[in-house]
Image: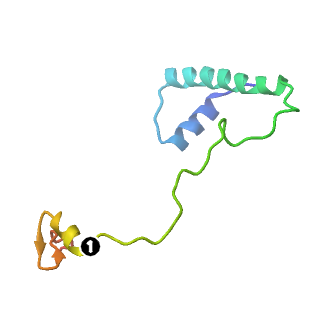
Amino acid sequence: MQIGKEQVEYLARLSGIELDEAEKETFSRQLLRIIGYVEQIGDLDLSGVPPTAHTQDLTNVMREDECRPGLPQDAALAMAPDRQGDYFRVPKVIKSE
């Protein structure tokens, strides 16, 4: 397989990067080596290896979704850097024209 200048330029355009001629040559050689390594997988006997999405067994570490009481209003407002009555006071973010 050959990785030509056109393929490298196409990948550079997709990536949004600019490459000079020396970089195009370097990337062409590097991509060819990477593809060679990937092609080596085809030489392996993988008949007893099940398809996997991850190399390790992963489990969901999130807790069950359950209703619990929220933070009381007084406790939340006590942590506010600025408050106005029973509300958080925040800077104005919408500019009027």
Q: Residue furthest front?
A: 69
The way the protein has been coloured in the rendering is rainbow
Residue at left offset 12%, top offset 72%: 83
Above or below 26: residue 53: below
Q: Position of residue 84 (x, y in %)?
A: 11, 76
Q: Amino acid at mark 1?
A: Pro
Of 4 and 52, the residue lying toward us: 52
Left or right: 96 as drawn, with respect to 62: left
Q: Position of residue 86 (x, y in %)?
A: 16, 79
Q: Position of residue 14 (x, y in %)?
A: 55, 43
Q: Position of residue 60 (x, y in %)?
A: 58, 51
Above or below 73: residue 21: above
The quadrant of the rendering that contains the N terminus is top right
Q: Mark 1: few, some, or many residues within 10 Å (few <14, many ≥20)?
A: few
Residue to which mark 1 is pinned: 72
Of 12 and 34, the residue lying toward us: 34
Above or below 64: residue 55: above
Residue at left offset 62%, top offset 20%: 29
Examine the image and state in which quarter residue 92 appears. Answer: bottom left
Secondary structure of the residue carrying tag 1 is loop
The quadrant of the rendering that contains the C terminus is bottom left
Of 37 and 19, the residue lying toward us: 37
